[in-house]
Amino acid sequence: MNRAWKGLLKSGIIFLTLSLFVYMFYHIDFLEFQRTPNPPFKNTRGSSDPGSNRNSCTFRPLSPEEIDEENTLLDSIAWPNTPSVPPPVSLNDTTNAARSNFVILPRPGGGSWLVGDQLEVMIKMFDFKGRPKNHGGDFLLVRLHNRTLEAGVAGQVVDHLNGTYSAVFLLPWEGKSQVEVTLVHPSEAIPFLQQFAGEKPNGVDFYSTFHSGLLTQKTMCSVCLPPTQQPQCNYTDLNTGELWFCYKPQNLSCDARIKHFSIYQNSSKVKEDILFKNGVTMNVGIPASGPAHVIVFPKMKGQLAATTDKDIPGPAGYYYKGLWSSLSGATVKRFNNASAISHCLKDKVVHMYGDSTVRQWLEFLSSELSDLKVYNLHNMKQAGPYVALDYAKNIFVTYRCHGLPIRILPSPVTELHYVANELDGITGGKTTVVVFGVWAHFTTFPIKYYIRRLMSIRKAVVRLLARAPDTRIIIRTANLKNSPSPFSAQLGGDWPSLQRDKILRTMFQGMDVYFVDAWEMTVAHYLKHDIHPPRPIIKNMIDVVLSYICP
Ligand SMILES: *[C@@H]1O[C@H](CO)[C@@H](O)[C@H](O)[C@H]1NC(C)=O
Ligand SMILES: *[C@@H]1O[C@H](CO)[C@@H](O)[C@H](O)[C@H]1NC(C)=O
Ligand SMILES: *[C@@H]1O[C@H](CO)[C@@H](O)[C@H](O)[C@H]1NC(C)=O
Ligand SMILES: *[C@@H]1O[C@H](CO)[C@@H](O)[C@H](O)[C@H]1NC(C)=O
Ligand SMILES: *[C@@H]1O[C@H](CO)[C@@H](O)[C@H](O)[C@H]1NC(C)=O
Ligand SMILES: *[C@@H]1O[C@H](CO)[C@@H](O)[C@H](O)[C@H]1NC(C)=O
Ligand SMILES: *[C@@H]1O[C@H](CO)[C@@H](O)[C@H](O)[C@H]1NC(C)=O
């Protein structure tokens, strides 16, 4: 790698190199989803295939209370069972969105729809042979929207477990709006996703480079290393208890580990392609039988809102004219120019931790605030860490990636810090803001690994809030992605993200922390889903963040 770079530079293709760096900075998403057919070096995986070894993952031991909590969490994300079909999978019994339909139910109590009403939609599923489905478990996304008004709100789906579903929407604005129902995955695909993203960590391999003197070696690393004859290095973090192992390089000591990187596995690992065909079995719109729109009138004094009998939480917020309004948290204020933003951040220290979806927030701030100077400390664009300073306004912002198991180009292991350890190093107080978002890189690991990671972060949050209760702690949830291929859906599509997102929300519920609901902010928006939401969505997210900091 190093020699290749030098070769490029020597040949004078500096322009190409520079463009590549620029490209990497702005197209990290592409890089993060690139696949390398084979590791460019000899694999030390040993004889057993990690994908075939279900029990090779090692988890941090839990206390009895933690075990109880883990069981409750696992129950809370249990997905309805799908009758298991022996392979080969046929489409015959699979949910077919194109043959399914939805109906908007009449307003309870009659009359016209009014702002503030709850609207209910009944969705009926059919399979590819046209037979009604008689079990639940399909993964649906629903929203109500009007593109011209740049208005949108996510609906809540109730699975009746008999092949029918209800979707409930709040009607926050007046005018004509469309109901949109999308089948993301048929229930038949879920067991494969569970296997892929759960018990069998797959799709991404992690490696470390070891270096000392003239020797350089690379070995595979994970919390899910199949045991082989080869001894392992134990990189357990003593403070958090987080585990990480690498196969010991043959002629180097475990202390010689210098870099960490990941490689996407060849897509030949993808299973049951037929269940993951974009536009056929995956990400397909369900047509309305009858009108797909409603016309909503303003509510007059004294008129009561119509409600369904479904006892479900309302939406977190909605878009109107492209602006996000919150229905669950603080009123969202608009920070439309640099002076409004820097006025809010004046004298503040903002620490950001997480994946590239959090880094987007720093990138947004630096692009808006010309006086906020960002330094990347000569590190990888992808990993950071970054430090940004507006000296005159006394604004200090940092960003650091959440550490292992980050999917990344070769990066120094010295820069991979666990979020909990970072939080333990923060004094906190009313001028300190902590932001974190930890989700996207966990989708190929068993959910138990994610639960343990959040437990360690939560303990550190509790300690931080105990020593400095005025510290503002803001959590960014997961968001929707665009996963058109079997590979991307299985590796970390919206279903594995949803499961982790539910865990995240449950674990931090009731604490003195603030959520940015990236999930609903991407469901409700008209722009195409993207792991890195486009700028108009980021702008709204920053409005929410700043509204928490400067209510
Ligand atoms: C993946 O591996 C299979 C079998 O080893 C090979 O036939 C296929 O061409 C590879 N695909 C890619 C995208 O490299
Ligand atoms: C699916 O249906 C087709 C046509 O009815 C039939 O020939 C085929 O055997 C069925 N496949 C399975 C696995 O049931
Ligand atoms: C499915 O269950 C729902 C809720 O209990 C019920 O309203 C509906 O009629 C049922 N549908 C079928 C087809 O059984
Ligand atoms: C969106 O709202 C505008 C203004 O109320 C209306 O003219 C238009 O028909 C609506 N569009 C859709 C697709 O419902
Ligand atoms: C790894 O190290 C930790 C901390 O020293 C220790 O508790 C744990 O038992 C070790 N694990 C293995 C598999 O050696
Ligand atoms: C390690 O050292 C032994 C003995 O010098 C040598 O045979 C072997 O090839 C070395 N292994 C690697 C991976 O360099
Ligand atoms: C920036 O926005 C604030 C609040 O919306 C407004 O009061 C102020 O006039 C704006 N400043 C500039 C320079 O546009």
Image (tube, grey):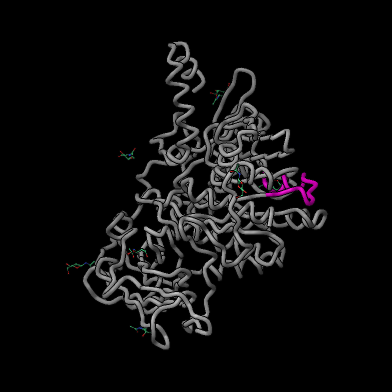
Q: Is residue 198 visible?
A: no
Q: Is residue 1 above or below residue 491?
A: above
Residue at left 55%, top 45%?
225
Query: In this view of the protein, which residue sits in the foreground, 152 or 283?
Result: 152
Residue at left 78%, top 49%?
428
- Asked whether residue 429 is drawn in magenta, I would say yes
Q: Is residue 313 left or right of residue 471?
A: left
Residue 481, position as x, y percentages in the image: 44, 52
Query: In this view of the protein, which residue sits in the foreground, 481 or 202?
Result: 481
Q: Which residues are magenta?
A: 418-434
Residue lying furthest right: 467
Query: In this view of the protein, which residue sits in the foreground, 366 or 33?
Result: 366
Q: Is residue 107 left or right of residue 126?
A: right
Residue 22, position as x, y percentages in the image: 48, 28
Residue 429, position as x, y percentages in the image: 79, 50
Q: Is residue 212 above or below residue 100?
A: above
Q: Is residue 494 left or right of residue 229?
A: left
**For the C terminus, which image quadrant?**
bottom right
Residue at left 58%, top 47%?
223
Residue lying furthest bottom: 109
Residue at left 59%, top 37%?
366
Dividing the picture into quarters, in which one does residue 459 lie?
Answer: bottom right
Dividing the picture into quarters, in which one does residue 13 lie?
Answer: top left
Instruction: Give the quadrant of ligand 4.
Output: bottom left
Residue 310, position as x, y percentages in the image: 48, 81
Q: Is residue 542 above or below residue 116?
A: above
